[in-house]
Amino acid sequence: MPCESSAYVSDTAPGRGSLRPARSWLHSDAARLPLNGPWRFRLSPTASVAEEFAAEGFDDSDWDDIPVPSHWVLRDDGAHGRPIYTNVQFPFPIDPPHVPDENPTGDYRRHVGIPADWAGAGRVLLRFDGVESLFKVWVNGVEIGSAAGSRLTHEFDVTRAVRPGDNVVAVRVHQWSAASYLEDQDQWWLPGIFRDVTLIARPAAGIEDVWLRTGFEDGRASVDPEITADAAAFPVTLRIPELGVDTTWATAADVVPFDVGGAEPWSAERPRLYDATVSSAAESIALRVGFRTVEIRGDRFLVNGRRVVFHGVNRHEAHPERGRVFDEDHAREDLARMKRFNVNAIRTSHYPPHPRLLDLADELGFWVVLECDLETHGFDKVGWTGNPSDDPAWREACLDRIRRTVERDKNHPSVVIWSLGNEAGTGSNLAAMSAWVHARDTGRPVHYEGDHTGEYTDVYSRMYASVPEIERIAADDSPATLMNCTPAQSVRQRGKPFLLCEYAHAMGNGPGGLDQYEALVDRHPRLHGGFVWEWRDHGILTTTPDGTPYYGYGGDFGEVVHDANFVMDGLVLSDDVPTPGLHEYKAVVQPIRFAFEADEVVVTNLRHSADTGDLRFVWRVEHEGAVVARGDLDVPVVAAGGTRRVPLPPVPVARDAETWLTLDAVLAAPTSWAPAGHVVATAQSDRSAPRPTPAVRHRSGWRPGDGTLRLGFAEFAGGSLVGLAGRAVTGPRLELFRAPTDNDEGTSDDLEDSDATVAGVSHAELWRREGLDRLTARRLSVTCTADALRTVDRVSAANSAAWVMTESVWSVEGDELELRVEIEPSSGWTTVWPRIGIRFDLPDGAAPVDGVTWFGLGPLESYPDSARAARTGLFSSAVGDLGVDYARPQETGHRAGLRRLTLASADTEVLHVTALADRLGRRPGFTLARHTPQQIARAGHPHELPDSTTTYLIVDAAQHGLGSRSCGPDVRPGFALRPEARTIRLRWARA
Ligand code: IPT
C-alpha cells in the first residue's frame, strides 16, 4: 500500500487546494517575482517519502542545486534518472488510475524575499507554467494545494501563507501520476518543473482577466471585450492608440461591443497587430490585438471571409539539451525558419506550448491549431477499455484541461482552431470538452481527429490518409463511405472543411509524394491542407562511453520499453539543420506559381489575402550552369487568388550547352524572418536547343582474352578495371541495394482501416530476404577488340535462383573512354528494387577523392517522388556534405538528372564523367559517399559507421521513391522501381 501522503498520485482530480480558475496569460504591470533560477533539489525513488521537507526550517544543506526550469532526467551528471521515449506504449503497467511504487519524486525548495510593499496586494498568486506530471506546493510550511496537467498553467492563491521578507517555497513533483494516463503523447517522458515559476502580486482593484475579441462584423472592424474584475476595479479604460480607441467603462455593465474605423486585418501573411492597453487605477495590461474573424461556411474554413490552406507543421517543444524547456531566442529562430520555408501554420502537438510562443506566432504570422494536453493512446493496446475519454471518473480532469487551454491563450489572433487533444479514442468526455468550448468561444471551431464520425467537432480531420482516400473525401459524388463511418456519417463529414492534422511522416529520408497532396488542395476547395508530422527531430544530446557526442533516441537510455527512432521524424534535424524534406516542402507549397509558355509566364498568387506587392521577380539564363543573362521581370502586383500573364525577356539559347531560364520571386525588403532577396518561390524552364545523344558504336570482331590490358587511360586486370588516369579505381559492380530508409523499413501502408499501423512486411525486409544487400558475381566471359573490352557477369545472391546479367563494354572514343553497362534481370524477382546502379570504388591512396562538381539536379538530393526542390544547374560540394546526417544512418545523397560530374581531390580535378541519356532519354543519378550502402545499413547511429579509406561513386539508372510508409502510405505506384532492364552509359575523361 502506498503510504497516506502519496495516495494522491492516483487521484483523477485535476487539482486540490487553493488552485485558481484558469485565466489569460497576461502581460500586466502588477508586481511579480520570477522564481526561475537555482532551487534546492532532492530526488527520491518513490512517492512515499515523508513530507517533512516542506517545513520552513527543514535543513536542505545536503541537497543538490537544480535549475528551474529544467527536467531532472536531463541533468548531465547522470545521477537523476534518464529520459524514456515511448510513442504509444505506457512505460508502466496499464492499471488506471494507479502508477507504480517506483515513482521518481523530486523535492524542490527555495527562499524568496517578498518586498514590504506587497503587503497591500489584494492577493498573491504562485504560478507554474509547466510541471510534469503532478505536483504539490507548500509555502512557509503551509500546504497550498496540488495540480496535474503538465503543459498547462496553474495558479495557486498563496495570500494566506506569504509574508513580507523571507519565505520558503517547497514543491514536490512526481514523475508518474493518474495524469500520466492523459499524457501519453509520442515524445520523451521528461519530469520536472520545466517552465517558469512566478510569484504574482494581484492588486486589490486589479483586472483578473481580459478577453478582447477583435474581428469583422459585416465588413466593419469590431471589438467585443470581456473584462473580469471586481466592481472596485472600475472605471476600466481600453486604449488602442493607433486606431484612436480610448474608451472608459464606468462599470462592468458598460462593457459592450463597439466598432472601430480603419483597422487592417490580421492574417498569417500580414500579421498586423495593434498595441492595446486595458487599465484600471491599480493595474495596466498590455495586449497586441489582431483583427480577424474565423468562420466555417459550408465545407469552407474561412478567415476574414477567405479560404485558408494550411501549409503547416506539427510543432513539439523539443531541444537536444533542454528538452521541453522553452528558450525564446531559439523558438523565434525556429519560427523564422518555418516562415523562410513557406510554412504558414502550426499545430501545437500535442499540448499548449510555452505561452510566449503564441505571442511570437501572432507577431510573425501563423495560423495556429492550439491543442489541449490530452492523449490516452496507450489504451489502444487494450481495445480502449477503461479509456479516460469515456469514463465519468475522468470527466472533470478532461474539462479542466480544455478550460486551462482555452482560457490561457484565448486572446491570440493566431489561434484559429481549438483542438481537444490527440489520439485519445473517443467518448463523452471529449464531447463535453467540445461543448464547453462551443459555449465559451463562439469564434473558433473545435478540432479532434479521433472524432472520426463527426459527432462533436466542426472540421473533418484525418491523419496519414492516402492520396486516393483524400480524393474520395473531396468528391461529392463518391459513393464511398469514409473511414469508420456509416453512409449517413459520411455525408455529415463531407459537409465539413477537411484538413490533415498529420500527414507526410518526415522520419529519416522523406517524405515522398508531398506534391500529390498539394495538387489535391489546388483542385478541391473542401480540402484545407494539413500539418506535416513533424517539425523537429527530438534527439537528446548524449555521448558514447568514450565521449563521442550523438543524438540519442529510444533505447539509448536503457529504457525497459521504448520505440527506438520513431521520435526522429522531423523536417529539421535535432541540431536545427533543415532536411531535404523541408526544402521539398518549401518548393511544393510555394505561394507563387509560374507556368511558362513560349514567350510568356503566367504568375499565380495562391496566398490567402496578401498581394505580391512585397515581392520582386528576378530571372536569369544559364548555359550549362553559367549565368549569361539576368534581370528583373516587371510583374504588376497580383492580388491574392489572381493571375497575371507577363512577357518573358529574350532568352539567348546556346548551341552546344543546355539553356535554362530560372525565375525567382524574392522578398523586396527585409522582414523579421528573412533578408531582402530571400527566395519565396522559384521555377525553371528548359530552353535548350535539341542535341542528339551520341549513338552506341557497335563493334564486331570480339575475341576471347585474359582481360589484362590498357585502353586509353584505363587499366584492367582479368577483365576488371583497376585504374583510371593513374589512380586506383575498381568497378563497375552491380548495386541493387540502398541502406533502407525509415520508410523502406515501414510497414504501415495506409491507416484507413485502423488507428494502429497496419502490420505488413517492409520493403527492406524483402530486400534482405532476396539478398540484394549481398550480391555475388560469376564472370561468364571476357572478350576484346583492338580498342574495346567486354565482360559478362551473372550476379545473384546466396540461396537465390534469380539473377541479373550485366554486360560491361569499355571502349576508346577519341580522348575519352566510354563504359556502357547493360543490366538485365532474370525472371523470378519478387520485390520492388531500391535502385539499379553500378558502384565504383576509389581508394584514398595519397589523395582521397573529397569533392565533386556536377551539372544536373541539385543542389540537394532528389528522388523520384521528391524532386520539386531540385533545379538543373552546376553545383559543387565536398563529399562529406553530400549526405544528410540522419540520426539513424540510411540512404541519402542521391542526385538525379546527372549530365556530367568532375571528381576532385583537395581542389584538384581528378576525373570527368559524362552521363549519357538512355534510349528513352532517361538520365541516371549519382551518389558519392564514404560508406557503402551495406556499411550504412549496419549502423544504428552515425558514430557506429566504420572509419573509411575509400570514396564510393554509385551511378544509378534509377532509384525507388521514398514514400512515407514509416507511418503512412507507401511509395505511389508511379514512383516504385520494378526490376527491369536498364542501360547506363558513361564517358570518362582525364582531368
Ligand atoms: C500519430 C500521432 O498522433 C503522433 O503523435 C505521432 O506519434 C505519429 O503518429 C507518428 O510519429 S498516431 C499514428 C497511429 C498514426
Image: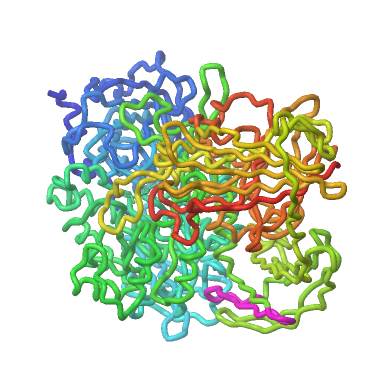
Q: Which residue is at 46% across, 71% downward?
A: 521
Q: Is residue 620 above or below residue 3?
A: below
Q: Is residue 231 magenta?
A: no
Q: Is residue 695 above or below residue 393?
A: below
State which quarter of the image contains the N terminus: top left
**Residue 194 percent coordinates (x, y):** 42, 37
**In terms of depth relative to the viewer, which is nearer, 712 or 240?**
712
Is 451 positioned to the left or the right of 23 in the image?
left
| Residue 196 visible (yes or no) | no
Is 290 positioned to the left or the right of 916 in the image?
left
Q: Is residue 595 above or below residue 955?
A: below
**Residue 541 percent coordinates (x, y):** 52, 31
State which quarter of the image contains the C terminus: top right
Q: Which residue is at 53% across, 58% downward?
A: 865
Residue at the far top in the pictured view? 62
Q: Which residue is at 45% across, 31% downward?
A: 798
The stretch of residues the image draws in magenta is 597-612
What secondary structure do most residues of the magenta stretch adopt?
loop
Q: Is residue 601 magenta?
A: yes
